[in-house]
Image: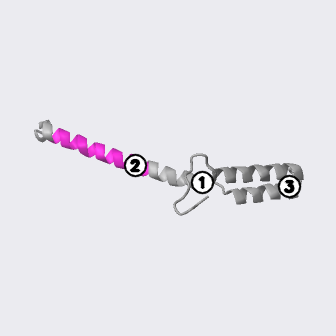
Amino acid sequence: MDVLSDPAVKAGLALLILIIVSAAAFFLVARLRDYTNGDRDSTSSGLLNFEEMRLKGDISEEEFRTIQAASRGTDEADAPENRPDAETAPGRND
């Protein structure tokens, strides 16, 4: 057990443990990000769900049109050319 009393060996073991813990944390974060990234629902499938609700009578035609207009507004606002800070793309003369 005289080997473990050497400061260089202790530092090496501490570094090895730190690397293993860091790799495990990186793996868990990457896996969690992949898992949560798949949870997003596209706008078109979301609208299909609302249309199905409208057909069943859960929401009215007016509510459906309001949701549809709001989703179109957010889609257009998210487009790069509609952002206030967006620059004109090279080759475009707007």
Label 2: how many Cα within 10 Å (few below 14, some 14–19, many 20+): few
Disc number lying in front (2 or 1) = 1
- Membership of 25 in magenta stretch: yes
26 and 90: which one is in front? 90
Quarter of the image with the N terminus is top left
The residue at the point 73 percent across, 50 percent down is 73
Residue 80, numbered label: 1
Q: Quadrant of residue 47?
A: bottom right
Residue 25 screen position, x and y as percent: 40, 46
Q: Which residue is mark 2?
A: 26
Residue 28 screen position, x and y as percent: 44, 49
* Marks 2,1: beta carbons within 8 A: no
Q: Residue furthest bottom?
A: 91
Q: Which residues are magenta?
A: 9-28
Residue 66 falls left or right of residue 40: right
- Mark 3: which secondary structure? helix
Residue 43 screen position, x and y as percent: 69, 56
Q: Which residue is mark 3?
A: 54
Label 1 is placed on what type of residue? Pro
* Marks 1,3: beta carbons within 8 A: no
42 and 34: which one is in front? 42
Label 2 is placed on what type of residue? Phe
Residue 21, numbered label: none
Quarter of the image with the C terminus is bottom right
Q: Residue furthest front?
A: 93
- Mark 2: which secondary structure? helix
Going from N to C along the chain, the mark reached first, 2 or 1, is 2
> Can you see residue 58?
yes
Disc number lying in front (1 or 3) = 1
Query: Whole-Å distance between the Cαs marked 2 and 3?
Result: 44 Å
